[in-house]
Amino acid sequence: MGINVEAAKISILNAKTALGIEFGSTRIKAVLVDENHIPIASGDHEWENRLENGIWTYSLEDIWTGLQDSYSNLVCDVKKKYDVELTTFGAIGFSAMMHGYMAFNDAGDLLVPFRTWRNSITGQAAKELIDLFQYNIPERWSIAHLYQAILNQEEHVGEIRFFTTLAGYIHWKMTGEKVLGIGDASGMFPIGMTTKNYDAKMIEKFDARIADKNYPWKLEEILPKALSAGEAAGMLTEEGAKLLDVSGKLQAGIPVCPPEGDAGTGMVATNSVARRTGNVSAGTSIFGMAVLEKDLDSFYPEIDMVTTPVGDLVAMVHANNCTSDLNAWVNLFKEFAEAFDMDVDMGKLFGTLYNKALEGDTDCGGLLSYGFFSGEFIMGMEEGRPLFVRSPESKFTLANFMRTHLYTAMGALKVGMDILTKREKVEIDKLYGHGGLFKTKGVGQRLMAAAMNTPISVMETAGEGGPWGMALLAAYMIQKEDGETLDHYLSEKVFHGDEGVSMEPVAEDVDGFEVFIERYKKGITIERAAVQDLI
């Protein structure tokens, strides 16, 4: 994805570009692409959520100063690289962390501080809604936050005239439009697979449940309108342009595409929006997503149901813990090497230890670990304790030790994904892998293929991430041909048939992982004892 400086400059001057800005949990990043979807400039801003009065939040000041700083840094990057001042784009799109709760009154004032996805304060609401809908409603979903506020009898609820996600809020202030991309909307309230809109029967049930409260609103009236990728979602207003670019040079009237959530932009960035495909993101946490051909027969607390940016149903398995404990062990080996006055290259150290794992027994020789720095819902753990155990008969070698920690980084994900593939018989032709676990070529990819018993592909472009995915959605809106699907557009015009480097599961690895995962599930009682007794 090399940059032709002159061609990029012409794209900027002719407004053939698309801008994607994504609010991640620790970084707000802007990525500018040319008409060939190649990133040509970027700008970012580091930020952190804060715990205030028991609520994880970002202030409105955090949101706007962060957005303005990331955009300003993009402007500087463009000036430095191309000696051009940014005044317009072909299209813009905004994305952010999904879920959470931002509620506004008739005057457009925020009624309570932004409650992010990270808050686990809606347990009662989530449980009651699951019973009401017979559908999994995770605690972080926007509807769970709203219903919990109702259960808490919070005064602000009667004043609500609109509630949305962070991406929906930014888009509203940029365009005046109260809309949301359907992928992000699916993390607010369940989406019907056939209607590609909020599930009408569930909305009816919710309204009936709270009818005795006599609020001056019905649920459908305060939800943002759900839009599919490619639909027009408004234009940048004069007020929006001034909010984004404090220098005042950005012009109004730029088309803005439907705002999306980070799950949707991740699907786009890995070309995994087609049915029977999916992606696995493996870093500090890990999640797997599979685009379904039909509804699941049952609902499961371990599986979140969301959608692609065009409304196709997606089963999502999310685990809190992945590489943190693995990285801690690698750092211990680093300390060991430094104790012998050896210079340590971390890339080489990771590569050496990861590759060593491939020499281990496929079932890890009887070793077992849990990398639970925090609780793990899929395994029924509210708290976590990193743990490594073995029996006297276990084969305690470096290769088995490293393989164990790589396996356990995928363990909770596998337990959740097995529900899809073994109980629900969901067929996945290919999964796309991205994130730190896949950096050492051929190791994380091979073992993930074994865990999922599915081919795993890794593409170089996956590292561009969500902001690039958002820019692609903006480009799709203005460049697509009549009737062209997002799947076709991505495959033929962005990735050009490049499916990355694919690795098939090795039969012996698959069998070995199955032995390990049974040990992993059975041994969870050891982890529970550690939580109880290791303070």
Image: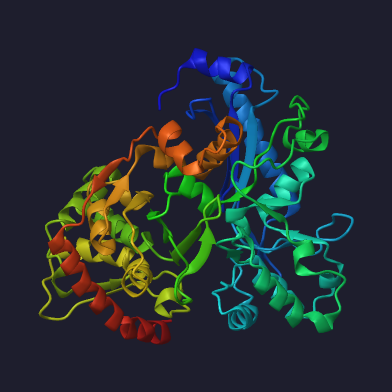
* Residue 46 appears anywhere in the view: no
Q: Where, quadrant-wise, is the N terminus in this rendering?
A: top left
In the image, residue 359 sits, relative to residue 16, either above or below, namely below
Pinpoint residue 298: horizontal percent, then vertical percent: 46, 77
- In the image, taking residue 230 as reference, residue 432 lies left or right, namely left
Pinpoint residue 350: horizontal percent, then vertical percent: 26, 49
Pinpoint residue 126: horizontal percent, then vertical percent: 61, 77
Pinpoint residue 98: horizontal percent, then vertical percent: 59, 57
Q: What colour-coding does the image apply? A: rainbow
- In the image, taking residue 252 as reference, residue 380 lies left or right, namely left
Taking depth in this image into account, of 330 and 412 the one nearest to the observer is 412
In the image, residue 175 sits, relative to residue 251, either above or below, namely below
* Quadrant in the picture for residue 492: top left
Q: Disc count in the image?
A: 0
Taking depth in this image into account, of 101 and 198 the one nearest to the observer is 198
Taking depth in this image into account, of 356 and 244 the one nearest to the observer is 244
Tell me what residue is drawn at x 72 percent, y 71 percent: 146
* Residue 273 appears anywhere in the view: yes
Tell me what residue is drawn at x 12 percent, y 76 percent: 394
* Quadrant in the picture for residue 328: bottom left
- In the image, taking residue 421 as reference, residue 491 lies left or right, namely right
Taking depth in this image into account, of 137 and 382 the one nearest to the observer is 137
Tell me what residue is drawn at x 66 percent, y 23 percent: 86
Q: Where, quadrant-wise, is the C terminus in this rendering?
A: bottom left
Tell me what residue is drawn at x 60 percent, y 20 percent: 12
